[in-house]
Image (spheres, rainbow, N blue to C red):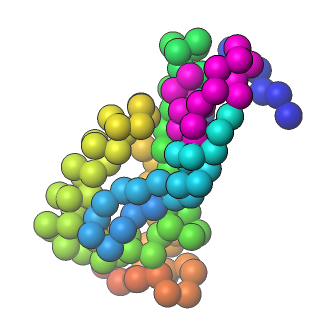
Amino acid sequence: MSLPVERATQITYAFANLSSEGQITPGEPAFDLNKATMLPDGRRVQGNYAVLRALKQTHPELKTVISIGGWHHSKHFSDVVANPQLRRVFAQSVLDFTAQYGFDGVELAWHFPGWGGKIGNSQRVEDGQN
């Protein structure tokens, strides 16, 4: 499928992972960082993050956002936001991750505060407040 990038203003890429230490990491490194891709102009890049950076080179008005969490990567949100030190680590990690991979912003896709969602996800009654 071909998308008309020149008509897009933002692309949200899903999903990055949140570790128990509050660090943001690529959700699927094999695709995010390592998948070889041939661009329409003949350049080869490694990983979907590189594809997004290349799109921004040819379409400078395009913004990219990394979505953190989702069903499979929300396991540690409750634990991280409940701890002030881990919240600071998380905030710095978001800044570092977006700078390293060229994203313009983040979306928190925490599934689901206060309920946990997937079995094994941490959860607390205070999730919404935290």
How many discs appear? Answer: 0
Q: Quadrant of the N terminus?
A: top right
Q: Which is nearer the eye, 43 or 118? A: 43
Which residue is the extreme one toward the left?
A: 85
Residue 85: % across, % down: 14, 66
Residue at 58%, 13% (x, y): give it: 59
Which residue is the extreme one toward the bottom?
A: 119
Q: Quadrant of the C terminus?
A: bottom left
Q: Is residue 50 magenta?
A: yes
Question: Is residue 16 in view from this perspective?
Answer: no
Q: Which is nearer the eye, 22 or 83? A: 22
Residue 56: % across, % down: 53, 20
Residue 43: % across, % down: 64, 20
Residue at 46%, 48% (x, y): give it: 107
Residues drawn in magenta: 38-54
Residue 110: % across, % down: 47, 64
| 49 shown above or below 108 | above
Residue at 20%, 59% (x, y): give it: 89
Q: Is residue 11 magenta?
A: no
Q: Quadrant of residue 118?
A: bottom right
Question: Is residue 43 in view from this perspective?
Answer: yes
Q: Which is nearer the eye, 129 or 108? A: 108
